[in-house]
Amino acid sequence: MKIVSIIGARPQFIKAAVVSKEIQKRNGIEDVLIHTGQHYDVNMSKIFFDELEIPHPNYNLEVGSGLHGAQTAAMLEKTEQILLTEKPDWAIVYGDTNSTIAGALAATKLHIKIAHVEAGLRSFNKLMPEEINRITTDRISDLLLVPSQNAMKLLKKENLAENSIFTGDVMFDSILFYQKMAEEKHSIESITKEHDFYLATVHRAENTDDKERLQNIFSAFSEMDKPVVLPLHPRTKSKLDGIKFNENVKIIDPVSYLEMILLLKNSSKVLTDSGGLQKEAYFMKKPCITMRDETEWIETLNGNWNFVVGANTKLILEKINVNQFDEQKEYYGNGNAGKNIIDALLKY
Ligand code: UD1
């Protein structure tokens, strides 16, 4: 069996690493990686492959940034050419980025079976490009590999239950696997001098492209009782002109995945607009404040582990002070998602 994985953005490198590791354990499966080049800065891309000790992509399409239509179209055109040459049995796509929908579209037109890892998530906000990407990808995929029971229910409502298999979440596998490597390869002192801090990330278009929202978020960070360590996405960096904040905000360059695990481990709480980090905070038992208007990971809201607060300064400051939590449940499987995914493909 030959599998082509199509990836392009930071979190997809990690998700594909889990699947590649599982493929390496089996005989007779060929693993081909296409990197669309959606993320191209060294510390947004290459660093992940180097440090996670995973195979580097066989192809890099070097598509780079651009308007959604142009970026997706360039990926689609170049992926199609490679799929025509490689003729895989399966195309695997991950999550909800432009690389996901481009890979899925290229494959489906060539009648190549598609497996969608992290299927079934919905924010019910069609203003998010990711929501369009996931709905359309789920619709055209042959096999929906689903991280949570809630996502299974959503797929059933959309009449997609027949193609759906609960596998658990690859990001849970990943954090279990890479924690030890993070401790071995890095020390927290080399990432930040802070000892008692909140960890924050901001990169969503809905926050970075709206000056008022971005200012509200930075105002909240400036007023917090602990320093806020903020590894900064290049898009957010380019939008900081005119945004006011004080020395409580400790901006650092984007960090690698292993460095992120260490930051998480050493932080007291997390503030983010990322999807993945909300869940990683949950896995590491760190309370999370989500600076968006909705979340796809609704299980994390139970027991006060996550609060959806939008870009509301007052609410962000209010929820960061909540300190009562219920016991957590294992909503995202038991760390065997990679195995379940390959089993599902083989059984199909
Ligand atoms: C993308 C995904 C988002 C995911 C995120 C993970 C889509 C629609 N969005 O968002 O769901 O959470 O990846 O990190 O696919 N840039 C650089 N260097 C890079 C990459 C980006 O400077 O290596 C800058 C460019 O100005 C670019 C902007 O960041 O225009 C946004 O990058 P893009 O890949 O379009 O989306 P992300 O915000 O990274």
Image: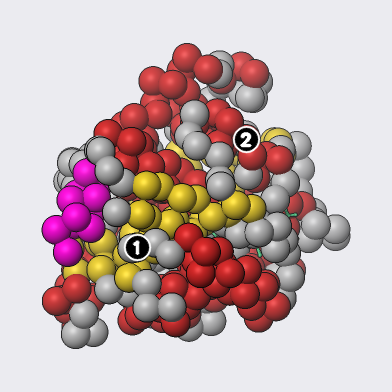
Q: Residues within 10 Å of mark 2 (few under 14, many from 20)?
A: some
Q: Residue at the spot x=53%, y=81% of the render?
A: 127
Q: How far, Cα to Cα, is label 1 from label 2?
A: 27 Å
Position of 117 relative to 131 (above/below): above
Name the colour scheme: secondary structure
Foreground residue among 330 and 82: 82
Q: Amino acid at mark 2?
A: Ile
* Mark 1 crowd level (few <14, some 14–19, many ≥20, 10 Å Cα): many
Between residue 48 and residue 249, name the one nearer to us: 48
Q: Is residue 95 above or below residue 154?
A: above
Q: Position of residue 274 (x, y in %)?
A: 50, 55
The chief SS type of the magenta part is helix
Residue at (47, 14) in percent of width and height: 184
Residue 135 visible in this rendered orientation of the protein: no
Q: Are marks 1 and 2 in contact (CB under 8 Å)?
A: no
Closer to us: mark 1 or mark 2?
A: 1
Amino acid type assigned to the residue bearing label 1 in the image: Trp
Outermost right residue: 242
Q: Position of residue 174 (x, y in %)?
A: 36, 38
> Would you say 246 lies left or right of 159 here?
right
Question: At 49% from the left edge and 50% from the top edge, which residue is drawn?
Answer: 33
Q: Dot 2: what SS?
A: helix
Residue shown at 71%/40% (left/top)?
Answer: 42
Q: Which residues are magenta?
A: 337-348
Please provide percent x and percent y for residue 19: 34, 45
Task: Kindly identify which residue carries mark 1.
Answer: 90
Q: Is residue 89 visible?
A: yes
The picture places residue 221, in percent across and down from the top left corner, at 63, 47
Q: Would residue 261 appear left or right of 221 to someone viewing this image? A: left
Asked if the residue at label 1 sits under 8 Å from ligand 1, the reply is: no
Query: Mark 1 or mark 2, which has the lower sequence index?
Result: 2
Which residue is under mark 2? 47
